[in-house]
Image (cartoon, grey):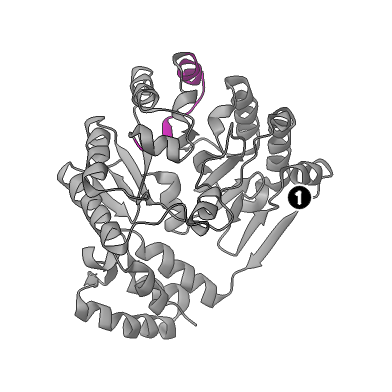
Amino acid sequence: MAGLYIHIPFCAKRCLYCDFFSNTEMKYKEPYVATVIREMELRKDYIGNEPLDTIYFGGGTPSQLQAADFERIFDAIHRLFDVSHYREITLEANPDDMTSEYVASLRSLPFNRVSMGVQSFKEEDLRFLNRRHNREQALRAVELCKKNDLTNISIDLIYGLPGQTVKEWESNLGIAINLDIPHLSAYHLIYEEGTALYKLKEAGKISPVDEDVSVALFSSLIDRLAANGYIHYEISNFARPGMFSRHNSSYWTGKKYLGIGPSAHSYNQENRQWNIFSLPAYLRAIETGKPEIEVEELDLNTRYNDFIITGLRTLWGVKFDEIQQLFGKDKLSYCQKQATPYLKQGLLKLEDDTLTLSREGIFVSDGIMSDLLWV
């Protein structure tokens, strides 16, 4: 079983912090749908004819497309792939796009999961982040989804905003919990080079929160959600039992996936591929039948490192017997040796021959993973 990711790059405006590939020129939207279909035709064999388990429309802002656009894409998916066993089809959406008319139009489509970029329920935060929606639109969007039987809802939140306090963050979390949604993703604000946010920081107009505050915010996130029945199944992701994101979990557990659209990444357990980071160039390349794709062939060392990085992010961890089976005894011995100091410090746990991060280890996970990598 494999995954299909379709990147919809269009945004009405760019958020302050965003470094994902996006485009605000809507003139490209009409030819884009046809080009996505053409790319699927050209690259459908990349995942080896495996049936699709998940389909994910990400962005950008996929909710900038209309029902007729999605119908064309779904018709092509059903023509080109085995969809007889799919379990999850996700639409990323902006809350202000989720009007009563728009949400009702989704009922004729096979979406069974919605992921909304709420980011905050505080108006001041939303204005700072240059989000298009306001608090009431976010609350209304969740309500509309539920009324239209789209109950498998995830929302994204951002913490660590300049000047943010633990009290403010807990207020945000309280609103999210009261919405009684099954999934929540929370990410610390990152100052990616080239973004408007980064430029403000470099100009001295804003300052990141200090490390102690960051730790307190993350601690509050873990504790509040755990107390309300959410499972912390990946460093940034929390879900009610049985409601994990199947698509994202496939990334972390090494399943195959095909990425369609500019900047989209693909993986087939032998190599990684990614499309060109230019919408006009992408459109031209697909039109000629020759996608501009970069390829990284994965040797044993790289595949081991990927296994460590993705596995340790999750509650499933990394199994020693799988390391030996997939990468050999040398890699297993190395992993065990590198993990030993962290096990003694209580930052890693070893249960049933499976290595996972402890709660304390999650806070220093980057360093732990780095030390377990083969160099």
Instruction: Establish if 147 lies above or below 248.
Output: above
Of residues 259 and 344, the one nearer the viewer is 344
Residue at coordinates 21% horizontally, 78% vertically from top-left?
Answer: 345
Residue 138 visible within the image = yes
Q: Element under label 1?
A: loop
Residue at coordinates 47% horizontally, 37% vertically from top-left?
Answer: 86
Instruction: Establish if 106 lies above or below 60.
Output: above
Of residues 254 and 5, the one nearer the viewer is 5
Magenta region: which residues? 101-120
Left of 278 or right of it: where is 224?
Answer: left
Please provide percent x and percent y for residue 205.
Answer: 47, 52
Amino acid type of disc 1?
Answer: Pro
Residue 87 visible within the image = no
Pointer 1: what residue? 291
Please provide percent x and percent y for residue 110.
Answer: 49, 26
Left of 178 or right of it: where is 312?
Answer: right
> In which quadrant of the rendered view does residue 315 lie?
bottom left
